[in-house]
Image: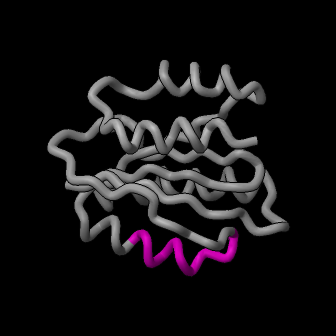
C-alpha cells in the first residue's frame, strides 16, 4: 500500500462547482478503487493525498493527467504505508481558513497521529501558501 501526494494548478476558468464535482466524483469512485485521502484547493492550486494499492493509484494518476480542470501535476511524496491514515475518508475536502497560522492549526487537528513526517511537512508547507 502507498501514500502519494501530488500538487497541480487549477485551470484559469475553474469554478467552485468544478471543485465540488471533482470531490463528488472522487467520493463516488474511490470506494471501488480502494482509495482514500483528502483534497485541498487554495483557490489556485490543488494538493491531494491518496492512499491505497499502488496499481490503483497509478490508474487514477493517469486519469488525472488527462483532466483539463488542472495542469502541471507533480508528485511530491510517494511512500509505502502499512496502515491507512484516512480509512474513513473516501475523499474529504479540507477547506482551510484564510489565516495562515490558523490553517496550520486546522491541519494539525484534522490529520491523524503517526503521519509520515515528510508528508506532513509537505501538507503543512502547502497550507502556508497564500
User: Which residue is at the front of the view, 27 or 111?
Assistant: 111
Please tell me in which quadrant of the rendered image residue 116 appears: top left
User: Is 99 in the magenta?
Assistant: no
- From what the image shows, is residue 12 above or below residue 28? below
Q: Which stretch did the figure color magenta? A: 60-69
Q: Position of residue 11 (x, y in %)?
A: 76, 68
Classify residue 106 as left or right of residue 82: right
User: Which residue is at the front of the view, 48 or 116?
Assistant: 116
Predominant secondary structure, magenta span: helix
- Residue drawn at x 34%, y 36% as measured from the top left: 117
Q: Position of residue 56 (x, y in %)?
A: 29, 67
Q: Residue furthest left?
A: 82
- Residue drawn at x 62%, y 54% as measured from the top left: 46
- From what the image shows, is residue 63 above or below residue 4? below
Q: Position of residue 58 (x, y in %)?
A: 34, 72
Please tell me in which quadrant of the rendered image residue 15 appears: bottom right
Q: Residue furthest right?
A: 13
Q: How is the image coloured?
A: one colour
- Residue drawn at x 77%, y 49% as measured from the top left: 43
- Figure disc tally: 0
Q: Quadrant of the N terminus?
A: bottom left
Classify residue 1 as left or right of residue 59: left
User: Is 63 in the magenta?
Assistant: yes
- Residue drawn at x 71%, y 63% as measured from the top left: 10
Residue 87 in view in this figure? no
Residue 117 in view in this figure? yes
Q: Quadrant of the C terminus?
A: top right
Q: Position of residue 99 (x, y in %)?
A: 75, 25
Amino acid at each position: 500500500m502507498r501514500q502519494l501526494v501530488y500538487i497541480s494548478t487549477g485551470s484559469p476558468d475553474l469554478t467552485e462547482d468544478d471543485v465540488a464535482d471533482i470531490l463528488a466524483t472522487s467520493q463516488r469512485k474511490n470506494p471501488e478503487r480502494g482509495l482514500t485521502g483528502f483534497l485541498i484547493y487554495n483557490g489556485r492550486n490543488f494538493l491531494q493525498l491518496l492512499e491505497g494499492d499502488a496499481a490503483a493509484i497509478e490508474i487514477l494518476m493517469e486519469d488525472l493527467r488527462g483532466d483539463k480542470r488542472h495542469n502541471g501535476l507533480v508528485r511530491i511524496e510517494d511512500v509505502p504505508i502499512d496502515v491507512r491514515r484516512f480509512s474513513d475518508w473516501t475523499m474529504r475536502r479540507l477547506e482551510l481558513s484564510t489565516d495562515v497560522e490558523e490553517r496550520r492549526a486546522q491541519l494539525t487537528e484534522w490529520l491523524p497521529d503517526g503521519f509520515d513526517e515528510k508528508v506532513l511537512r509537505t501538507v503543512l508547507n502547502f497550507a502556508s501558501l497564500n
